[in-house]
Image: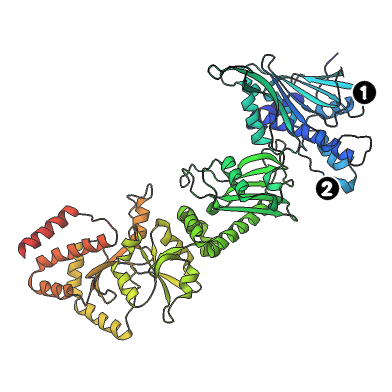
Amino acid sequence: MAKKQFKTESKKLLDMMINSIYTHKEIFLRELISNASDAIDKLYFRSLTDTTVSLVRGDYEIRIIADKAARTLEIRDNGCGMAKEELESNLGTIARSGSFDFKNGDEPKENADKIDIIGQFGVGFYSAFMVSEKITVTSRAYGSEEAYKWESEGVDGYLVEKAEKEGFGTSVLLKLRPDTDDEKYSEFLDEYRIKDLVRKYSDYIRYPIRMMVAKTRRKDGSSDDNPEYEEYLEDETLNRMIPIWKKEKSEVTDEEYNNFYKEKFRDYEDPVKVIRQKTEGVSDYIALLFIPARAPYGYYTRDFEKGLQLYSSGVLIMDKCKELLPDYFSFVKGLVDSADLSLNISREMLQHDRQLKIIAKALEKKIKDELQKMLENERDKYKEFFREFGTQIKYGVYADFGVHKETLKDLMIFSTSMGDEPTTLKEYVSRMKDDQKKIYFAVGDSREQAELLPQVEAVTAKGYEVLYLTEDVDEFAFMMLHDYDGKEFLNVSSDELDLGTDEEKESLKAENEAAKEMLGFMKDAIGDDISAVRFTNSLKDHPACLSSEGALSASMEKTLGKMPGQENAGIKAEKVLEINSAHPIADKLRKLYDSDREKLNKYAKILYANARLISGLAIQNPSEIGELVTSLMIDE
C-alpha cells in the first residue's frame, strides 16, 4: 500500500516541530498522556447523555508498557478511539486537533464550556518523533467492530490500514531511536524515569496512569539465617489524579499542605504561610502558594530563578513562570492552575500574556494582604519571615524608581530606640511627639553601632524615637520613600539635624563666625576628604562627629563603594567634621590655635579619624594616626 503524504508543508513543518518547538525531548510523554486523557474525556462526556455507553468513571485508565528488548514504549487508553477517517484527519494533518473540534463544534453549546480538554492544538502527538524512528497508532472507535492502524516514520508520510484490536480505545506504540553519544533514548524505557516524568508532568491527570513495575519480595520458605528474594511484577498507579489544590479547603489538613510543599519544592522545613486562592470571573484559576521559612541557597544571587509552577487543567506547562511574581515577592513558591491560558502550539509557552498579567496582579494583592495579616496577627512569625526576606521587600521599595513603594512600605519593620521589638513606619508615626516634624534614623552595620552614634544620644535626649537601619538598602529605600504620612525621613548624621531653639541657633552661628579662621585651619589640616569643620550644639557628651551635606550620606558612600566596579568610581559624600561646642575639647582647640598650631594640626586629624570610626568608616591612614597619637602621649 502506497504511503499518503501529510496534508500540510509536511517535511518543513514536521522538522520544525521536532527540532524547534519543543525545548525538552521528555515532553513527548506528557503530550501522549494528555491526548489519552482527552480521548477518555470525550467518551466520559458522551456517557452523560448516551445510554449506549455503559462505562462508569472508575473504568477508565491510561496504561504505559515499556519493552526494553524491543525498544518500544506503548501508551494505551480506553477512551473514545478513532475511526479510519478520524485517524487520517487527526494524524494526517499536522496542527489539526480533534480535541479542539470536540470542544468547539461536536458538543452542544450548553456543554461546551463545561468540558475541560487539555490538548487543543493537534501537534503534541508529533513530539513523539523526537525520540521515535517509527510510530504506530492502533485505534478502535467505541461502538465499532473495526480497528485501524496509522503508521509513520516521519516526514516521508504515513499508512492507514485495517488492524486487529481487542476492545475500543487507542494504542500509540513508539519504536525508539538508537542511542547516540549525545542522546540516550533508552532512558525513556527505564521504569524510574517513566515514573519521574509522570509525576512531574501528568501527576494530576484525572484518570489513573498504570504500569507494571518490578518489585522484590522474600521467597516463601527461605530461612531467617539465609533469606532469599525474588522479583515479581505488580500493577502500580503512577499518578495521584486529584491535585491537592483542587480539593476543598476543609478536606486538606495543615500537615498535608506542609508535606506537599516539602516534597514538591524540596524543602526540609514547613512553610511559614500557606496561601490558597480560587478565582472565577475575568480569569479562572486556582493558586496554592507557600512562603518558605528560610531563604533558599543562592536566593540573593543573580543565579536565583523566581517563578511559580504553571499548570493547565492539572498538566504542568512551565516549571518556573517568572511573570507570575514581582521581584519583591520572588521568595514565594507554589503553583497556579488555569484552564484559561492561551498556550502556543507546543504548550510550553504562552501565546500572549494578558491572562498572566491579570493573574499576576491578583496574586500580588493576595500575597501582600496575607503578609499584612501575618504582621498584624502573628508578629513573632512575621519577624522570622522578615529576617529572611525583608531585604527583598526593601529592594522592592527602592527598585524601579519607587513604583512599588506604596504597596510595600507598610510591610517593612525596623529596630528602634523605643525597645527591643521592631516597629513599622505606621507605628512609629503614631508615637511621634506633638512637636516632632521628622522621622529620625541612624545607620550602622549593626543596631549596636548605630545606637552609639553621637547624634543618636542628642535626638533621644529630646524624647524622639530613632530607627536603626542596618542593611545597605535601608537608607536608599527611605530616600525613595521621602516621607511617610507627610513626615519626612532625616538621617541623624545629616547636617540638617537641628535640635536647638532659635536663640541657640543664633548663638551657634556667632560662635562659628568667631572661630572661622581656626575651623578653616583644621579643615586644611585634614584635607579634601571633608568639606568643612564647624561647631555644633546637636551633640550631648561626645566631642565630635561626622555629618553629611546634601542627599548622599557617608553611609551611602560606603555602600556604593562596595558595589562591583564602583571601588574607584570617586563617589563621595560631602562630609563635615562637627565639634561639640559645649565639650572641653572646644576650649582645648581654641587654646592650641593661639599657642601651638602644630599640635592643633595633629588634634584635627585624630578627631577626624575618631569620628570616622564612630560612623563605621575605615581610617584612611592608620599608620599616620597611630604615630600622631603616640607623639601626643609622649608630649603630655
Total numbered labels: 2
Residue 478 or residue 56, whichever sits in front:
56
**Three-letter code for the amino acid on which mark 2 is drawn:** Asp
Task: In the displayed orientation, state which residue is furthest to the bottom.
Answer: 503
Residue 359 vs residue 55, the one in the foreground: 55
Gap in Å between the C-alphas at discs 2 and 1? 32 Å
Of callouts 2 and 1, the N-terminal one: 2
**Discs 2, 1 touching: Cβ within 8 Å:** no
Q: Position of residue 229 (x, y in %)?
A: 60, 18
Query: Does 86 appear above or below 262?
Result: above
Q: How crowded is mark 2: few (under 14 residues within 10 Å), some or many (20 or more)?
A: few
Task: Please determine whether, in this image, residue 147 is positioned above or below residue 21.
Answer: above
Q: Is residue 417 above or below residue 387?
A: below
Describe the element under mark 1 as helix, strand or loop: loop
Residue 67, percent across and down? 69, 18
Q: Which mark, by number, is residue 611?
A: none
- The 10 Å Cα crowd at callout 1, few under 14, some 14 to 19, many 20 or more, is few
- Residue 490 in view, yes or no: yes
Q: Mark 2 points at which residue?
A: 113
Could you tell me the amino acid type at mark 1?
Answer: Glu
The quarter of the image holding the C terminus is bottom left
Q: Would you say residue 529 is visible in this rendering? A: no
- Write down the quadrant of residue 600 in the picture: bottom left
| Residue 532 in picture, x, y percent from top left | 25, 68
- Nearest the viewer among 202 and 442 is 202
Estimate the x, y position of residue 296 in percent, counting from the top left.
Answer: 49, 45
List the residue tagged with mark 1: 145
Q: Give the secondary structure at mark 2.
A: loop
Position of 93 with respect to 363 (left or right) is: right
Question: Which of the colour schemes (rainbow, by chain, secondary structure, one colour) is used?
Answer: rainbow
Q: Height in image: 230 above or below 616?
A: above
